[in-house]
Amino acid sequence: MSFLNIFINIDQSVANFFYISRNIELIKIFTIITFFGEWQIVAGMAIIFSFILLLYKKKMYILSLWITLIGSGIFSSIGKLIFHRLRPDTAFYIEDSFSFPSGHATIAIAFYGFVIFFLCQMIKKREYKICILFLGLILIFAIGFSRLYLGVHFLSDVCAGYFLGAFWLFVGIIILKWLQHRKV
């Protein structure tokens, strides 16, 4: 059995497990959670967040945020075009794009990860930083999990999305640190 077949078998097993485990109450909950990974919602929140950053005179953060979001969005779209992976047959509802990588998982790490990073930079109390990190990671995890539970992605789609989003978050932070260093 090849390495690829192992991933395909794991993906299908996880998709089947969530399909047989679905119930209407959890579907309602995960439909709400997945909403926080929709690009329209994230774009709206990113615009609001950008205005907040502008008010607090954190202009370098704005540039880094948008590089993170646009880079992750473009590369997620390119991945979907390259891989042409169909979504699971067990999907609760129909999506009109390809499956790999998960755009929701990508944007969850990229956007919410950036917000977590910013808040942890601004807040001094260690306890508050831990709380923000914990709550943010729960939201990021819940968005990816919702995609699995609703059957619109395979496990490898979500994992690849998380990796891609983390890569672009790292790029955005590096650019921010470079800009801050250059200004000093």
Image (cartoon, rainbow, N blue to C red):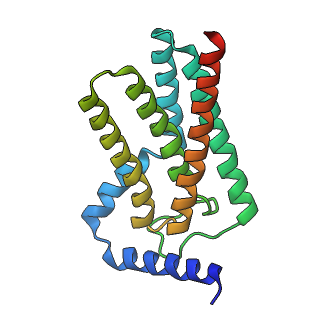
The foreground one among 117 and 15 is 117
What is the x, y in percent for residue 164?
Answer: 60, 50
Q: Quadrant of residue 19?
A: bottom left
Rendered residue at 69%/44% (across/down): 74
Q: Is residue 41 above or below residue 35?
A: above
Return the x and y of residue 8 as percentages of the image width and height: 58, 79
How many circles with numbers are drawn on the protein? 0
Residue 38 in sight here: no
Q: Position of residue 101 (x, y in %)?
A: 61, 59
Residue 114 visible to the viewer: yes
Location of residue 39 with respect to 67 vertically, above or below: below
**Residue 139: horizontal and vertical position, in percent?**
36, 46
Residue at the image position 45 percent from the left and 32 percent from the top: 117
Location of residue 146 (image quadrant): bottom left
Left or right of 100: which side holds 134?
left
Residue at image x 63%, y 70%?
A: 86
Q: Is residue 151 above or below residue 179?
A: below
Q: Residue furthest bottom?
A: 1
User: At x 38% / y 28%, what residue is drawn?
Assistant: 120
Horizontal side of 92 relative to 22 (left or right) equals right
Q: Is residue 158 above or below residue 114?
A: below
- Quarter containing the C terminus: top right
